[in-house]
Image: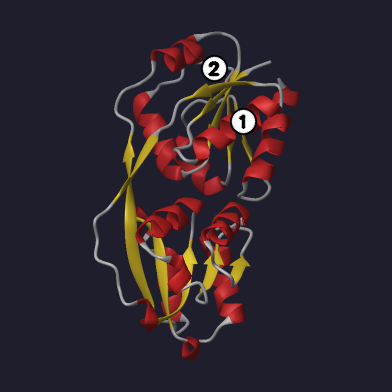
Amino acid sequence: MPKVIITRAEPGHSQTLEHVRALGLTAMSAPMLDLVARDVPLPDFTEYGALLFTSANGVRFFAERVNIAGICDLGAYCVGPATLEAAKHAGFEDCQNADGDAEDLAALIAEHRTPSHGKLLHIANQAAAGHMAQTLRTRGFGVDFLPLYAAHAARTPLQSVRETLAASAPALVLVHSAKAAEAFKALYELPRETPHMLVAVSEKAARPLAGAGFASTIIAERPNETTLMAALLAACARL
């Protein structure tokens, strides 16, 4: 069976390792990002009608800083099932799942809320401010951004990954985010006529590695862990 190079950052990295091994595949740990908390001031949460989370990590860093019990009645809009699960585990009572990406989350909010329901607070990675908030603002919503953590790219390549990529046996590179893909591209170079395949959680996540030389790329049907594992099995079936 092929080796699977897992680029996801912790805390999800360990979970993905388990999922890949449960499929009977050889998992290689190669996290491309290091997530660190940012010491930013917290706002007055009574000013907001709902919170927006575009990753389970956003929920985790939020729960580390805030007493959820005091604001659990605030609506928590989540980008996908893993984020939804994290929000429920943190103690939020009113949780909604967009089951997609940031654009799907914006559409869900526009469907369920109006600007009169109150201002929104997007909690995420420092680099995540942008399109979703702008989309909501064009629809009249007030949106603030709370960057509770930052993602630092790995700087040192792993010799085990280099050797795997240099080998003739095909390997699968698994990416969960565009930032992880960018970090991978900066650290590793594929040989010419490589047999290796890229398996990505979304087209956005795969985009930085377009033209990197992979034999083929498989995108998950939906941007979540379950369909990503299905895409991984589909990639194995092609080898």
Residue 221 horizontal side relative to residue 125, left or right: right
Q: Secondary structure at mark 2?
A: loop
Which residue does the numbered mark 1 point to in the structure image?
A: 18
Q: Is residue 50 above or below residue 169?
A: below
Q: Quadrant of the C terminus?
A: top right
Amino acid type at mark 2: Thr
Query: Could you say which quadrant of the image residue 43 lies in?
Result: bottom left
Amino acid type at mark 1: Glu
Name the residue rendered at 38%, 18% in the picture.
158
Front-lying residue, 71 or 189: 71
Q: Distance from label 2 to label 1 (Cα)? A: 27 Å
Position of residue 33 measured from the top left corner of the image (x, y, whole percent): 38, 37
Position of residue 222 measured from the top left corner of the image (x, y, whole percent): 66, 50
Dots 2, 1 in contact, CB < 8 A: no
Position of residue 110 measured from the top left corner of the image (x, y, whole percent): 56, 78
In the image, which is nearer the foreground, mark 2 or mark 1? 1
Which residue does the numbered mark 2 point to in the structure image?
A: 194
Residue 230 horizontal side relative to residue 58, left or right: right
Going from N to C along the chain, the mark reached first, 2 or 1, is 1
Name the residue rendered at 75%, 25% in the picture.
237
